[in-house]
Image (cartoon, grey):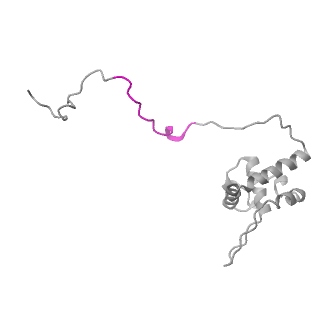
Amino acid sequence: MEARFADVPNRLWSLIVAVLPKEPPKPHGGRPRVSDRRILAGIVYRLKTGCQWKALPAEFGSGSTCHRRFSEWVGRGTFVKIWEVLLEFYDVKKGIDWKWTSLDAAIIKAPKGGILQAPTRRTAPRAAARGTSSRTGGAYRSA
């Protein structure tokens, strides 16, 4: 693992900690919570490398824990605030050319052929009559 992902720099962390929600109380005790700083480093690593959550290095804690905290922050709107702090920090440090953007995508074949095809609506009457008639209730009647 690259050393630059191992931790969030102190200057950056001091800006981010202000927007994070407080740790929920544990009235019945329980396992100690993985620090938000460590989780954020894992989230940044995952976003940078594109690896699966379960493939995160152990230095960031469990991939499931990182994903759970990330989902919690996204649900509360906290991650948008963190992202804004990260962008502003990077803009001051390196500079961002705000006129250009880029999007990375991958297009692959759907497994097992994708979803089932919807039935096609008929646009013209049938060419030949069926063996039964709807007028007779579907049963053959002789005259």
Residue 118 lies in the magenta-colored region: yes
Which residue is located at x 77 percent, y 63 percent?
A: 36
Q: Position of residue 92 (x, y in %)?
A: 91, 47
Q: Which residues are magenta?
A: 109-124
Q: Position of residue 86 (x, y in %)?
A: 82, 51
The mark tally for this picture is 0
Instruction: List the single residue furthest toward the bottom.
Output: 28
Q: Nearer the viewer, residue 14 or 113?
A: 14
Which residue is located at x 84 percent, y 38 percent?
A: 98
Q: Position of residue 73 (x, y in %)?
A: 71, 57
Q: Nearer the viewer, residue 126 or 112?
A: 126
Instruction: List the single residue furthest toward the left.
Output: 143
In the image, residue 133 sits, relative to residue 96, either above or below, namely above
In the image, residue 19 sits, relative to residue 137, either above or below, namely below
Q: Nearer the viewer, residue 129 or 116?
A: 129
Locate the C terminus by quadrant: top left
* Quadrant in which residue 67 is drawn: bottom right
Residue 85 lies in the magenta-colored region: no
Query: Relative to 27, is 48 on the left or the right?
Result: right
